[in-house]
Image (cartoon, helix red, strand yellow):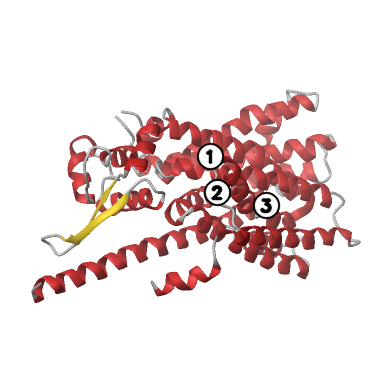
Amino acid sequence: MKPLNYAILKHFTKVKEACADDVIEALKKEYGHFKALKKPAVIEAIMTGEANGLLEETRYDLDEKGELRVYYRAHEEGAATINNYIPD
Amino acid sequence: MDNTSSSANATAVAAKKQLSSNFFKKGVTVAILSGMFYGLYTAFMTLGMANGVWADWYGVNNAALSAFVITYMLGALGSALNDTLSALWCIGIAAFKGKLGDYFRTLKTKPGRVMIFAALLGGPIASTAYVVALQMAGSIVIPITALCPAIGAIMARILFKQKLTPRMLLGIAICFSAALMIGSTSMSADAPPNLLLGICIAFICAFGWGLEGCIAGYGTSMIDYEIGITIRQSTSGLSNLLILVPILAMLAGNIGLAPSLVVQAVTSGPAIIWFVVSGFFAVFAYSLWYKGNSMCGAALGMACNGAYSFWGPFFCWLVLGVFAGMEGWALPPIAWVAAIVMAFGILIIAMNPLDLFRRKEA
C-alpha cells in the first residue's frame, strides 16, 4: 500500500484524465478509511501537483449538482517524474 | 449555444476562477503564517535557553562548563530539544489526523529519503548554526538567515538548472547590502564580543536552509506536508540528539557530558516548558513553509516566508523584552531598516513585484 498522496498522483499515470471525484471513487476501496480522502484535501493535492508541473488541467464543467468539476492529466514529463519517484 | 448552457458555462468559468484564486490566496497566507510561526518559535526557544539550568550555564556557570561547550554544544542541545519536542507534536498531530501509517510508508520511499537528506541539511547543520549564531550575536542574525531564499535560488541554478535572471541577481545584491548594513552595527561600542563570528555562523545556517528549501521542494510536491514535516522534525531532532550532541561532547573531551546535559535540560522545568511551546510553533514554521512553497511555488513561498526577518526580531522583542523583561532585545534602528531592505531584496529575487498587481487583476 502506498501513501495516499502517492496513490492520488499515481492514478493520473493510469488514466487519460480524471477529476477529484474520479480519484476518490477509484481509491475508495483501498483508502476509504483514510480521513484525508475528502474532496477538499484531494483537490488541494491535485492542484499542488499542478503547481509543481506534475499534472495539468484538461477541462472543466459543472456536475449534475451544479458543482465545479475540473479534470487533470499527467503529461508525458509529469508522468515520467511521478513514475521515477513512485514506482509501482 | 442556448441560454441555459451559456449561463451554466459562465457559472463554471466564475467557479473555476474562484477556485484558482482561493488556492493562490491560501498558498500566500500559509507562507506568510510560516514566517510568523518562525518568529514565535525563535523567541520561545531563546526564552527556554535563558531559564532554569540554562540560566546557570550561560550565566554564573556553577556547572563549570568550558567555553567550547557553552558556545557550541549548548546551541546543538537547544536545537535538538526544540526539534525532538517538535517531532513529538508532529507525530501527535499526524496520529490525530490518521496520517501516521502514511508517515512510516513514506519513510521507505525515494521522496521520503530526499526529505530525510534535506532534513539533515536543515536540521543538524543549519539549526545548530542558527542557535549558536543567535546566542553569539542576538536576534540581529535573523535577517541574515533570511538570506536562505537567495542561496536557495543560486543552488537551484547549480543543482536543478533553474533560472537565475538579472532581476533575481539584483535582489541578491540588495540582500547583501542589507547584510552589510547589519554588519556595520558590530563596529559600535556596545556590540556583543562575538557579534562578527555569530554573523558568519548565521551564513552557514542560511546556506543549509537554502539548500533544504530547494531540495525539499522537490520532495514535497509528492509528500503530504504534514507527513513531510514529521519526517523533517524526527530526522532533525534525533540526529541532533543522538549524533551531533555526542560528537560535540567528544570534541569537548568528555562523552559523558552528552547524556548528563540532556537529562539536566529535560528535567529543568522552567526551561523545558518553553521548549514545548517553541517545538509546537516550529511544527507550523516548517510545515507551512513546505506547504506554501508547494502551493504557490518555491520562489513566492520563500519570499513570503522570508518576512521572518521582521517576525523574528519582533517576537524576540515582544516575548523576551516585553513579556520576560530581559534587556538587550531592542534592535538598533538600522537593523530594522536593513530587515526591511532585505525583505524587499528577497521579494525581488523571488518574483517580479509587478506580478503582484497582475495577479490581483486576474
Q: CA distance from mark 3 to mark 1?
A: 19 Å
Q: Amino acid at mark 3?
A: Thr
Chain letter of the residue carrying label 2:
B
For label 1, the SS is: helix
Q: Which three-letter amino acid code belongs to the residue tagged 2?
A: Ala
Residue A88: give x, y in percent of width and height: 30, 28
Observer-nearest of B56 and B300? B300
- Which callout, 3 or 1, points at the residue further toward the start of the chain? 3
- Please give the label number shown on residue B145: 3
| Tags 3 and 1 on a common chain | yes
Instruction: Report whether A53 appears left or right of B302.
Output: left
Vertical position of residue A69 compared to residue B261: above or below: below
Decide: few, some or many residues near mark 1? Use Cα within 10 Å; few <14, some 14-19, many ≥20.
many
Q: Amino acid at mark 1?
A: Gln
Q: Give the chain letter at badge 3.
A: B
Q: Earlier in the sequence, mark 2 or mark 3?
A: 3
Q: Quick one: SS at disc 3?
A: helix
Nearest the viewer among A17 and B227 is A17
Lateral position of residue B127 relative to residue A87, left or right: right
- Asked if disc 2 and disc 1 are in contact, CB closer than 8 Å, the reply is yes
Q: Nearer the viewer, residue B147 or B98?
A: B147
Residue B162 horizontal/vertical position (percent): 54, 48
Mark 2 vs mark 3: give the one in front. Answer: 3
The chain letter under disc 1 is: B
**Label number found at residue B259:** none
Q: How far apart, in angstroms, are the residues tagged by discs 2 and 1? A: 9 Å
Residue at which label 1 appears: B233
What's the distance in space between the residues labelled 2 and 3, CA to CA? Answer: 16 Å
